[in-house]
Amino acid sequence: MTIKLNDTALLRAGPYIDGQWRTSSAGTLAVRNPATSAIVTEIATADRAMTNEAILAAHRAMKDWQAVSAKARAQVLRRWFDLMMAHQDDLAVIMTTEQGKTLAESRGEVAYGAAFMEWFGEQAKRVDGDVIPAPSGDKRVICIKQPVGVVAAITPWNFPNAMIARKAAPALAAGCAIVIKPASETPLSALAMAELAERAGVPAGVLNVVVGSSSEIGPALTDSPLVRKLTFTGSTEVGIQLEQACAATLKRTSMELGGNAPFIVFEDADIEAAVQGALISKYRNSGQTCVCTNRILVQASIHDEFVERLVAETAALKMGNGLDEGVEQGPLVNVGAVEEVERLVRLSTEAGAKVELGGARSELGPCYFVPTVLTGVTPEMAVFRNEIFGPVAPVTAFADEADAIALANDTEFGLASYFYTRDIGRVWRVAEALDYGMVGINEGIISNEMAPFGGVKASGSGREGSKYGIDDYLEIKYILMGGLDR
Ligand code: NAP
């Protein structure tokens, strides 16, 4: 199968290291289209030695890059933004082909990803220092901010563009060089971004992409003393392993990990708005986002009405190949993902959950699972406790506000949360009581480049995007000037 693009040079076939596209390599990686299960292409992979080359190249290139003025770095990021938007359609086709999400969602993700280039280009010029009151009149205390050093970024397949953009943009804005290891399911989007970075004028070595086995590339990144920061987006399980691996070299880390988002609907809510919010928050990317609603908690008095409307809207979602017009639900990323969703649904129905809709694989192909609504879900059930990462909406009834908050917080995770109410007192009480890094009130979609994205508890540490997002890539240096009275 081939991918039809306006600009065929966006399809790259191997790692990008020190400004060179590598085609000879340690091995190859087959990229599959989950909609058809067909192999799209095979690309050359990097091994540990090539990853070390990339780290060394980044270390060398950073010396000049950090000396470039913030304004000049901002201009490069702005050109990268412009190029990503100019190639939005091609980048979206590549993404849908390797990941499965609908073309409309892929286009949206490219715009979301590009927005980080624009935002952090602007922020590069606002990395201000401080002059702090000194302990005596003959002294002055100054703080300056400097790039943290070479950054390693490991990213997941569910947002093949934006999760890279959210790390590469602040790193480059801060004056760091970066080595990116994208997920093996979605290397083509990462390589296309690197192609556009090169065209935007990112100097050789400042941005490197190593595709390939995580067992080869991961240890090279975590063990190297030249890498001063690791930024990871992915599962909590792998995040913990990486945190431990980084301890030996005391790297700075930021971890964007798994979620188990509650979506609370109080009886005073606008029910139609809540159903629409639940639909978009649950079924976006076929349920494969870390901020996807994972548990719908509905006040008992409106439970039946809410479920009836949710089932009707969910049943109307059009499933199919994300490249086809009008499709609203694509396949899951691979067969393993379908098997895991199937397992969680089976365990929960065996424990007493009722299938209101779906509950099984689709005949469309091995990677499709029918959008599903479950009711009667209780806190011990597998769909309540685990991140589902699929199109399954588990509904639990609750009695009152205290009950809703207790259910919502009954999880190790703490990434996104949502609730619907028209009561202003409740808005504040519940927003403050939820143990989460992010709260959406009467909204099912909350991500944007200007807001701080991140979690607490097992959902990780650090914030991406916003005015805070560049701090993870900066060190504060304190300078004391003495003897000023002589
Ligand atoms: P994953 O299995 O943790 O993989 C993520 C990345 O880590 C991939 O590039 C993977 O490479 C790499 N990796 C896996 N094991 C590794 C190891 N031992 N050493 C070094 N690298 C390793 O997660 P996923 O299945 O791709 O993504 C889904 C998860 O990401 C979900 O839990 C989701 O909630 C989370 N997520 C979080 C956020 C957030 O901002 N909080 C955003 C999006 C997704 P390979 O592909 O080569 O195995």
Image: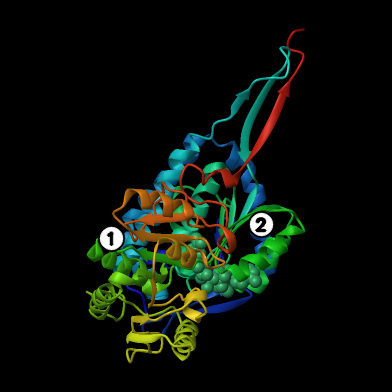
Q: Which mark is residue 435?
A: none
Amino acid type indicated by mark 1: Ala
Nearer to me, 393 or 381: 381
Residue 183 in view of the camera: no
Q: Position of residue 134 (x, y in %)?
A: 69, 19
Q: Position of residue 464 (x, y in %)?
A: 50, 51
Please say if 306 is above or below 486.
Answer: below
Q: Residue at x 37, y 71 (%)?
A: 285
Amino acid type indicated by mark 2: Ile
Please say if 272 is above or below 365.
Answer: above
Q: Residue at x 27, y 79 (%)?
A: 311
Q: Could you say whether the residue bearing mark 1 is in a helix, strand or loop?
A: loop
According to the picture, the residue beneath numbered tag 2 turns out to be 55
According to the picture, the residue beneath numbered tag 1 turns out to be 269
Is 49 left, or right, of 128 in this rendering? right
Nearer to me, 482 or 296: 296
Q: Position of residue 481 (x, y in %)?
A: 72, 20
Q: Could you say whether the residue bearing mark 2 is in a helix, strand or loop?
A: helix
Q: Quadrant of the N terminus?
A: bottom left
Is 360 left, or right, of 310 in this rendering? right
Q: Residues within 10 Å of mark 1 (few under 14, many from 20)?
A: some
Nearer to me, 158 or 410: 410
